[in-house]
Amino acid sequence: MAYQPSAEDFRSVFGEKQPEPILKLRNFGILALMTEIDGILHFVLTKRAAHVRQPGDICFPGGHQETGENLKQTALRETEEELGIPAEKIQILGPGNFMLTVYGGLVQPYIGLVSQEDFRRLRCQKEEVAEVFTVPVSFFLEHTPEVHYMYWHADMSVDFPYDRIENGRAYPFSSCKIPELFYFYEGRTIWGLTAQIIESIVKELPGNVSI
């Protein structure tokens, strides 16, 4: 006789379950690193090298989670690899809001602080990082980003079984509209995920112009 699950079976499996995403996600830890320069907090940003993925983009240090580490450890490890700042020199102030991307990724930023002295000792990895620069946090408090939109539509494989669903090719597949934020600072464009993280962080601060 085929197995017939009982309500107790469901309770034993799901009663204390910690929910996880149904679709497999790639997890990323990002460090929104800051340092204090002449008494003013700055975000520490990098420009990606020309030969890596997303060349020329401005971003925070961070990357893909490795086996056995949590996302805070990921963010600190990647920062040390990219900028040469040891994890023990960084004070984690707390987590930011995470993002689920249309690319199947979960991105968890952490907000970190490094002393000006230790920041001056950084040794960036030239294979990945073309430039390191800072932007006063106050700039993002005082400037609202430009908003432009990207549209994502369903794009099926050639053998997608339209004949098995109601209305076939005329089925009203969902599409999504995603805001892309753009900041412009001293000739540099800060956009995409980095702009989303910055905007998410600073909008919770009491001095934000949008509050």
Image (cartoon, rainbow, N blue to C red):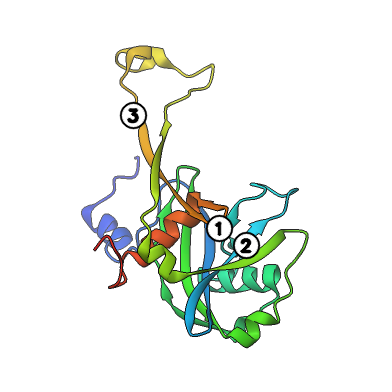
Secondary structure beneath label 1 = loop
Q: Amino acid at mark 3?
A: Ser
Q: Answer yes or no: do the residues labelled 3 and 1 have beta carbons within 8 Å?
A: no
On screen, residue 41 above or below 45: below
Classify residue 81 as left or right of residue 138: right
Residue 158 position, x and y percent, is 54, 16
Q: Is residue 25 visible?
A: no
Residue 187 position, x and y percent, is 57, 53
Among the 4 quarters of the image, the one containing residue 73: bottom right
Residue 91 position, x and y percent, is 51, 84
The tag earlier along the polypeptide, 2 or 3, is 2
Residue at left 36%, top 36%? 177
Residue at left 41%, top 15%? 162
Q: Amino acid at mark 1?
A: Glu
Secondary structure beneath label 3 = loop
Depth order, front residue of 176/193: 193
The tag earlier along the polypeptide, 3 or 1, is 3
Q: Answer yes or no: do the residues labelled 2 and 3 have beta carbons within 8 Å?
A: no
Which residue has dot 2 on it?
A: 46
Total count of labels: 3
Q: Answer yes or no: do the residues labelled 2 and 1 have beta carbons within 8 Å?
A: no
Mark nearest the camera among 2 and 1 is 1
Which residue has dot 1 on it?
A: 186
On screen, residue 165 above or below 192: above
Classify residue 48 as left or right of residue 7: right
How much space separates mark 2 and mark 1, taking CA atoms?
Answer: 14 Å
Which residue has dot 3 on it?
A: 174
> Quadrant where the N terminus lies?
top left
How much space separates mark 3 and mark 1, taking CA atoms?
Answer: 39 Å
